[in-house]
Image (spheres, grey):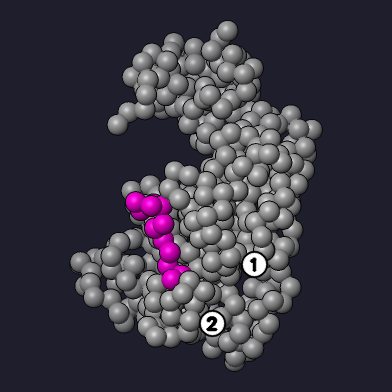
């Protein structure tokens, strides 16, 4: 169903403004003629839209563009390095993080802090996060940037179309809505959204090209598995996130791999998280699950595994086997082209992948067609633990790219875009 007013003159203009700014963001610097060729509009129509975006400060002119044919080269266009910024925030079991990105995708400010959030009351956690959000927005104000949206990543189930964390077992939260607190303490920008961290990690893969160098863009159908203390997954089908009817799709960490096995915080037994979650692997390696911060723990595991420590190698090998068992069902059900390991799993992939891939191969019930790979490709995310936070910041910024004339822009920007 079309959005209200989508086929009105104003709705068409909004849609075309979005097409133009997205084309410049993807390909700039680019001339007006280049934009017209990319979006399929006349040069005159594109010129009018570009002028509106220039008045709003969302685009800038960079000087003569490289000519694409005969005639004088047009002026190059690029998205502005000032103006709207997307704010991403992350609530982890043992850390908090906030970052701001501009329209060019550059991180302009970032804060990270260790925090013992497991079984903490939501109030103190959200108050501390609000202070970090305020500090980041103050920093970017000095860079002539203003917050255009806020997205918060959480390690739990988020109600579809809402901001309520229905259940985050590793935080000990049930039916917690962070939005009212953050709005009250930070004057948080609209839109304010709350999203599962694994989903945002997958969106980072989809939007950012699979790595800091922009290479390795995943195919339109992939499964993204990430881990901190818990294990989550996100399913992308035809380039779209599969959310499920309640928004709970992807709870891989609570898929039973050994029925009747170890009790899990969710109330069930034998869940994947109890065999491949960070705490389970640390205990199996003879290490303290509460040792230092999350990245320090993962680095310790990686160093010990690289040094050939037998207990650590065995713990990671067994975790890979458990992941392979859980992923077998997901691969058979969804038939993805690629499985990406994110979060802590990305750093530990060299020691997880051999047993994981052996399990997938041994349990595969589908014979490949001639010329196809023998099994799904499994690889490590190049964004790793940064994926959820970057995905959150980019998700916040997409409100501008998807609707530059949106009701959530400032009044001044909206007036400039409308030509008033």
Please provide the residue range marked out in magenta. Answer: 243-254
Residue 316 has which mark?
2
Neighbour class for label 2 at 10 Å: few (<14), some, many (≥20)?
A: many
Q: Quadrant of residue 348?
A: bottom right
Residue 226 in the image: above or below residue 387: below
Is residue 252 in the magenta section? yes
Is residue 163 in the magenta section? no
x and y percentages locating residue 211 in the rendered image: 55, 54
Q: Residue at x 53, y 79 (%)?
A: 351
- Can residue 68 be seen in this snapshot? no
Residue beneath label 1, please? 118
Q: Is residue 130 left or right of residue 46?
A: right
Q: Is residue 211 left or right of residue 118?
A: left
Q: Which is more toward the observer, 407 or 10?
A: 407
Neighbour class for label 1 at 10 Å: few (<14), some, many (≥20)?
A: some
Residue 26 in the image: above or below residue 43: below
Q: Residue at x 40, y 19 (%)?
A: 11
Q: Residue at x 46, y 74 (%)?
A: 267
């Amino acid at each position: 169903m079309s959005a209200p007013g989508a086929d009105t003159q104003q709705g068409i203009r909004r849609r075309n403004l979005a097409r133009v700014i997205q084309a410049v963001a993807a390909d700039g610097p680019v001339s007006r003629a280049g934009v017209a060729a990319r979006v399929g509009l006349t040069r005159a129509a594109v010129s009018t839209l570009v002028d509106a975006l220039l008045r709003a400060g969302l685009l800038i002119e960079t000087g003569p563009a490289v000519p694409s044919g005969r005639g004088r080269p047009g002026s190059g266009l690029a998205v502005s390095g000032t103006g709207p910024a997307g704010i991403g925030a992350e609530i982890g079991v043992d850390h908090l993080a906030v970052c701001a990105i501009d329209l060019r995708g550059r991180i302009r400010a970032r804060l990270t802090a260790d925090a013992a959030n497991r079984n903490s009351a939501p109030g103190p956690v959200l108050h501390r996060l609000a202070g970090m959000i305020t500090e980041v927005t103050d920093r970017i104000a000095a860079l002539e940037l203003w917050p255009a949206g806020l997205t918060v990543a959480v390690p739990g189930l988020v109600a579809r179309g809402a901001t309520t964390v229905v259940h985050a077992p590793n935080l000990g939260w049930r039916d917690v809505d962070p939005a009212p607190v953050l709005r009250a303490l930070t004057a948080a920008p609209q839109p304010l959204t709350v999203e599962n961290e694994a989903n945002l990690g997958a969106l980072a893969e989809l939007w950012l090209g699979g790595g800091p160098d922009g290479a390795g863009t995943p195919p339109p159908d992939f499964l993204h598995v990430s881990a901190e203390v818990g294990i989550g997954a996100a399913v992308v089908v035809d380039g779209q996130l599969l959310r499920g009817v309640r928004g709970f799709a992807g709870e891989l960490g609570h898929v039973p791999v050994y029925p009747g096995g170890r009790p899990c915080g969710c109330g069930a037994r034998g869940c994947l998280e109890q065999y491949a979650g960070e705490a389970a692997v640390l205990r199996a390696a003879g290490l303290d699950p509460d040792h230092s911060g999350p990245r320090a723990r993962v680095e310790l595991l990686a160093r010990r595994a690289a040094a050939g420590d037998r207990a650590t190698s065995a713990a990671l090998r067994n975790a890979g086997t458990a992941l392979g068992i859980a992923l077998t069902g997901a691969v058979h059900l969804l038939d993805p082209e690629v499985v990406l390991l994110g979060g802590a799993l990305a750093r530990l992939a060299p020691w997880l992948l051999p047993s994981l891939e052996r399990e997938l191969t041994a349990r595969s019930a589908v014979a490949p067609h001639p010329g196809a790979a023998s099994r799904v490709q499994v690889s490590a995310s190049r964004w790793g633990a940064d994926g959820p936070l970057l995905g959150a910041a980019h998700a916040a910024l997409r409100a501008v790219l998807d609707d530059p004339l949106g009701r959530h822009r400032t009044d001044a920007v909206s007036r400039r875009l409308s030509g008033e």
